[in-house]
Amino acid sequence: MYNRKSLNLFLVGLAGITLFGASCSKVKDLYNETDTGSDSSSLFPDGVNVPTDFMWNSARAVDVRVAVDDKFSGKYFYRVEIFDNDPALGTGTNLLAAGQAKSGQDFVGKLMVPTVAKYIYLRETSPLGVAAISMVEVGQQNTISVDGAQAAVASKASVLRGSTSSALLASGGLKAAASITEAATVVVPSDAVEISGNGSIYVESNKSYVIKSGVTFTGTINANNGSSNVKIYVQGVWKNTGNEFNLGGNNTLIVAQAGSIQLANVTQNTNGRFENYGAASLSKMTTTNSSLYINYGTLDVNEATVTNGSFTNYGIATIQKLSSSTSGTIVRNEGTLTVNNADFTNATLEAVCHTTIKTMKTNGATISIASGSLLSLEDLNATGTKINLAASSILDVTTKVTFDTWSNNLMGPSSGQALARLKKVELIKGGTPITYSGNVEVACSDHTPNEQYNTYYVVNSPAKIVPYDKSTVVISSTSCNAGGNNAAGGNPSDQTVTEVKLGTYSYAFEDNWPSIGDYDMNDFVVDVAITKVQNSANKITKLKLVNKIRSVGAKNRLAAAIQLDGVLATNVKSVKYTNENLVGQNLPLGSNGVESNQKYAVVTLCDDAHKAFGISDTQFISTQNGNFQPVESDITIEFTSPLDNFTFADLNSFIITNGYKVSSRTEIHLVGYKATDKMNKALVENQTAKGQLSANDPFRSSKGEPWGLCIPVSFVYPNEYKKITGVYPKFESWALSGGSQDTNWYVK
């Protein structure tokens, strides 16, 4: 039981709606109780004050501008939609804003972003019907601008021209070390020692050896004997599949253009070098300790291990199993490289020309794809991997990509465009397995979605996701990308938006203003959803408020209404109420359907909250056992002059208590919102002078407490006599931190 002196303020909330009410004594003789001097209804313990600048917002208004990458010279509209969560989720995702845009007409709007949201999701649908999704980090920004048109200018400036090796490596991508046409002609020193037969050859430092053309050598060469600066040339054939060949330290094996080798293994100790201009068939190929292996010819390897060295291919190389496990190790392809199974840990793969790998596993690796080049994979399993795509490059995964929990990054160029064509993306949940960024289009129709309160992937604009078979990036054909990529075909048409259905917000009130309530936040609870009807210029011609009154935990009569802040009453052409029995009695309406004698448009939710449920007395409604069905009604408002913007921030919801006359009318609004023209302003001045209210806001107590909250979901309000701080354990830390902690306090 609480008395009037000990009652204490509660919640006002989010930028959003306001409702009216009557004072809510939870017990019949509430105000006749003896004053015990205690403050049992205080929201927080004595001496605990809420930060003075806290607005009790669980969402905030953000201005947004989107310029589309118009490929149709302003002839057709693109559809622009902005969501609070991954639209792939379906449920749990709310539309924040929508409209149309084209060259010369950006989409400009205002939207409410829940403070719990780290990102907003932008979906642009082109005149060809291709939907592209990107993500924009919200942070503390009050204005968000996405300029796809600017990215397009950079893209058009660097479109691939031709297929020469210099063009393939343009736009800040990989740079060629050489090319097959630049490979030096192998010149064998005249004093080279000839090798033949099938014996064992013991080499000496600073000498050259040669297997001449027409000669087949089937023996062994002992180069791992402490010798150095030894060069072994193969112009003929060296065939020995039974013994390993170790180059030793600082020695070189060179297979000339007409030469060939068939060996069990080629390995070395330190600074070895293997150059193949002919044909090499190896069971194993192993590099260690700063060795350099280069293939200009034809190389066929069953198992290759590149460790603390590098392997570069300019010719045609086929490797069944390729692995590397050290940082600083580079595998580079500037020719044709085909691998059945690859495993890279902390190493680098550089795809400068068409590289084909059936299955690849990476851990802490770096993958770079050059301009005009294609990396083809069937399966990729990546952990902590960086994938860098240059302008006009393509990553093509035909079966599945699995991004593990350790963060991966797929990055497009700063100018130009790249394409990542991914048949299926599976994310191992935990952390953020993949972040897409830069000018890259990710073509994927089967992607693990983000969840309502968990972000598993990020698409930082200008990166975007489009359907797998609807890629829009134009990449010219080269000898290194298997035909490039062309824009999706079809007949363009306008992608317009005429009706925008935003999400649902709950407004929950305590009704004892200017005295304190019991903080169960159920004296009046209503859900409100907004539907906007727009013209081709994204101006609002009609507004529909879909309302659902869910509880009246008050023993006294109350009414509820919404003022459309900034919208003059004279700009309202008409208001239609689907449930006319709820309105028009206690709050007189003008001929156009808004409350009479108000400067700004005020529409009524209900004249009498109890009677709205068909109850003649003032019993508690749906706060003890939920025994009443919500009362639903729609309010459709048509404007004389279209509105530029409108969202939940413009809904000034309030409840009316203590009568309806101007001389006595008491309104309870959210923190940060102003009363209507009919509020009893003398009462406000009196209570402020007494120190009961904040000097800066009459709907905030002197301790910073509110009387109303706005929550960006359908709020599960506390039952009767249950204090919100007990029902929602994170509520207190959210409030006392000024909204910086536990922003999802209302999620059960």
Image (cartoon, rainbow, N blue to C red):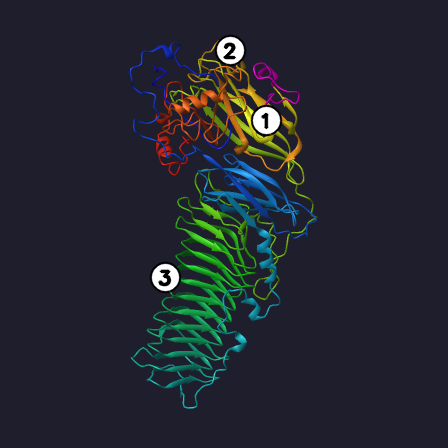
Marks 2 and 1, the one that precedes in the sequence: 1
Marks 3 and 1, the one that precedes in the sequence: 3
Q: Are marks 2 and 1 in contact (CB under 8 Å)?
A: no
Rendering coords of residue 516 (x, y %):
38, 21
Residue located beneath label 2 in the image: 615
Q: Residues within 10 Å of mark 1 (few under 14, many from 20)?
A: some
Q: Is residue 76 left or right of residue 307?
A: right
Q: Residues within 10 Å of mark 2 (few under 14, many from 20)?
A: few
Rendered position, 188 above or below 179: below
Q: Is residue 547 left or right of residue 723?
A: right
Look at the image and give the residue range highlighted in magenta. Answer: 579-597
The answer to whether residue 218 shows anywhere in this view is: no
Q: For the residues marked 2 and 1, what is the alpha-carbon distance in whole angstroms?
A: 33 Å
Residue located beneath label 1 in the image: 599
Q: Nearer the viewer, mark 2 or mark 1?
A: 1
Rendering coords of residue 543 (x, y %):
61, 30
Residue located beneath label 3 in the image: 325
Marks 2 and 3, the one that precedes in the sequence: 3
Q: Nearer the viewer, residue 637 or 270?
A: 637
